[in-house]
Amino acid sequence: MLQSKLFYFAKKDFPKDEESLNAKYLIRAGFVEKLSAGVYHFLPLGLRVLNKLVNLVRKEMNLLEAQEVLLPALHPKENWLITQRWEKFDALFKIKSRTENEYALGPTHEEVIFPLLKKGIQSYKDLPIALFQIQTKFRDELRAKAGLLRCREFIMKDLYSFHKDSKEVEKYKEKVDKAYLKIFKLLNLPVYKTLASGGTFSDFSTEFQVPTENGEDEIFVCENCNIAWNREIFNEIKCKNCKKEVFKTKAIEVGNTFNLGTGFSEKFQLKYKDKNGKENFVFAGCYGLGITRLIGAVVEVFHDENGIIWPKIISPYSIHFLILKEKIKLKDYEKIFEIFEKFNLDFLIDDRKVSFGQKLVESDLLGISLRIITSDKLKDKFEVKLRDKKDVKILNRNQLVNFLKDYVSKIPFSKI
């Protein structure tokens, strides 16, 4: 991709009307643009990050043998009346059609997935089953001032699993927890598995919290056990497991897992027949992962005074190729581009006729994980720098090939 053709508008200064770091950096660098409070456009660079994260999450959900669906965002009022959440769900967007029918814009999908499963589950042979989607949600947040961390319109991955009993739910929940931890590890994102107030059939639900000074939650962490507790259920100074002292920190919740028990199944009369022909309510689990929120959390953690520092696996491009020359001839670099393509690396070429200083400043701002520079001064060599490192390497073509071979080996998958 040629940067001269890229639809983005990097700014010299941070936006003054944003409070959160993630919004400041993402808007300034041209990844997103604000439409209104809690509502953001995803521009091409931002969408590339989003798509790479979605691909990563989808891959892990497929490994859990979950099937992907896409459920409506427009929910009939009747379904929300059945669960008694039409009035109780404070952040519910409600709309009325020209035919006077009322709907909710889905903030979550229990109200539509349980009625759907009634059409697909009859006997124990139909269980277990797991369905997930990656879809836009809507919540009428009163204070949408945290960038992508608290939006009125956002993208979420929600997974629902259906089972014969609570033990099966807990076993599947444990698998999902491990999948989430794997995703965070691939992002190099520090996350604590955090115990929170329980679901219907368990003492605790699980949250996944990213420690950061700008977080909205408070958690108590035991580094010895590598586990944390949410402030709402914990008021002690020592770990409940090992009795060592815990410390308090602010954090951002990026995911959660719940054992729903049979609560929603009872409301929608979702049942299955066991081997003896007896009807039983279906047990269910719910597992959420905030996709756009996770992007915001990544930026909150991975940045410096110069810009964003993207983890390799979701960097908008694998390589930012800067041509620091007065006269730019792209044909001169076709063999280099072929090398990038051979390694399945996507790349952004800064071919713009702007000052070299501006190119370097914007490169740091964009935060693409690897920068390669060519210039008259370097002649037939290349300056290579990782965004998260300070050291710079000067490499000839053969050395560059070897460097890229090693670089690619450390990225699970790199190209959209």
Image: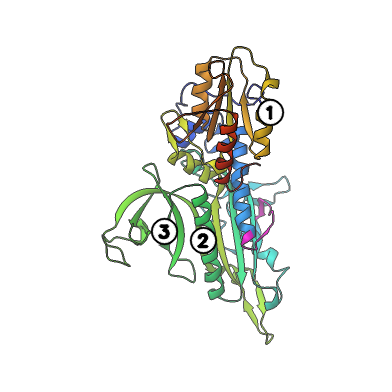
What label does residue 335 carry, if any?
Answer: 1
Question: Is residue 44 positioned above or below 200 on the image?
Answer: above
Q: What residue type is labelled 1?
A: Lys
Q: What residue type is labelled 3?
A: Thr
Gap between marks 3 and 2 measured at Cα = 13 Å
Q: What element carries label 3?
A: strand
Question: Is residue 281 positioned above or below 408 on the image?
Answer: below
Front disc: 1 or 2: 1
Q: What element carries label 2?
A: helix
Neighbour class for label 1 at 10 Å: few (<14), some, many (≥20)? few
Quadrant placement of the C terminus: top right
Quadrant placement of the N terminus: top right
How many numbered marks does the figure carry?
Answer: 3
Furthest toward the bottom, the residue is 276
Horizontally, is 212 left or right of 94 in the view?
A: left
Query: Toward which corner of the image does residue 39 lie, by quadrant?
Result: top right
Q: What residue type is labelled 2?
A: Lys
Q: Residue at the location (59% across, 27% down)?
A: 321
Neighbour class for label 3 at 10 Å: few (<14), some, many (≥20)? many
Question: Is residue 4 positioned above or below 190 on the image?
Answer: above
Residue 279 image position (x, y, % from top left): 65, 81
Residue 149 image position (x, y, % from top left): 48, 43
**Which of the pair 375/367 is nearer the observer?**
375
Earlier in the chain: of badge 3 and badge 2, it is: 2
**Residue indicated by mark 3:** 194
Gap between marks 3 and 1 measured at Cα = 50 Å
Q: Is mark 1 on a helix, strand or loop?
A: helix
Q: What stretch is highlighted in magenta?
A: 63-76
